[in-house]
Image (cartoon, helix red, strand yellow):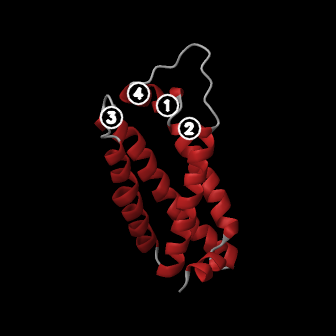
Amino acid sequence: MTMTKLLSEIHWGAVLPCALVYGIFCGVWHRPFLFGKKWEKAMGFKRMIGWTDPPIQFVVPMLASLVTTIAVAMLLQLLALNTFAEVLTVALILGIGFGAPIVYTVGTIPIMHKPLTFGSITGSAQALGITVMTVVMHYLSRWIEGG
């Protein structure tokens, strides 16, 4: 199946809300009232009084969430999973097998103060976010199909 055909067959009505929720979930995970303070400390970042997050801190993660969600939708289309166990297995492979390890690798850059803390916070957000988004994407796509 070609990329064009896959893109035309995914359920955009499922992709867009899943991408939005996935992006918001990861953003909230990193806010100071949850894990944000430890995450910032792990990077060696200290908020100055009056600090405002620049737009790039919202735009890039939302675009990344959209791209990831589209890729998951395409993969689900190719796999044609039938059972919850199959869907959950693929979701866990994607979240734990790709999302978390990539973040841990990024966390090892030399300027990172606490790479394992950074990896644990952001890696768990990605693992959980991708896992949940994959399961929801599967069932929302099926619901849109009418089955």
Depth check, front residue: 93 or 55: 55
Find the distance from the CA under tag 3 to the CA under tag 4.
8 Å
* Nearest to N terminus: mark 3 or mark 1: 1
Q: Amino acid at mark 2?
A: Val
Q: Which residue is mark 3?
A: 117
Q: Which residue is mark 1?
A: 34
Q: Is residue 26 above or below residue 49?
A: below
Residue 134, image x and y in percent?
51, 63
Q: Which residue is mark 2?
A: 28
Residue 116, image x and y in percent?
29, 37
Is residue 146 among what the camera can see?
yes
Residue 106 found in image quarter: top left
Q: Are marks 2 and 1 in contact (CB under 8 Å)?
A: yes
Q: Are marks 1 and 4 in contact (CB under 8 Å)?
A: no
Residue 146, image x and y in percent?
69, 79
Find the distance from the CA under tag 1 to the CA under tag 4.
9 Å
Which one is closest to the eye, mark 3 or mark 2? Answer: 3
Residue 22, image x and y in percent?
56, 51
Within 10 angstroms of label 4, few (less than 14), some, or many (20 or more) residues? some
Is residue 81 among what the camera can see?
no
Q: Are marks 3 and 4 in contact (CB under 8 Å)?
A: yes
Which part of the image, by quadrant, shows the C terminus?
bottom right
Find the distance from the CA under tag 3 to the CA under tag 2.
17 Å
Find the distance from the CA under tag 2 to the CA under tag 1.
7 Å
Q: Amino acid at mark 4?
A: Lys
Find the distance from the CA under tag 3 to the CA under tag 1.
14 Å
Q: Which residue is mark 4?
A: 38
Within 10 angstroms of label 2, few (less than 14), some, or many (20 or more) residues? some
Q: Residue at x 54, y 73 (%)?
A: 74
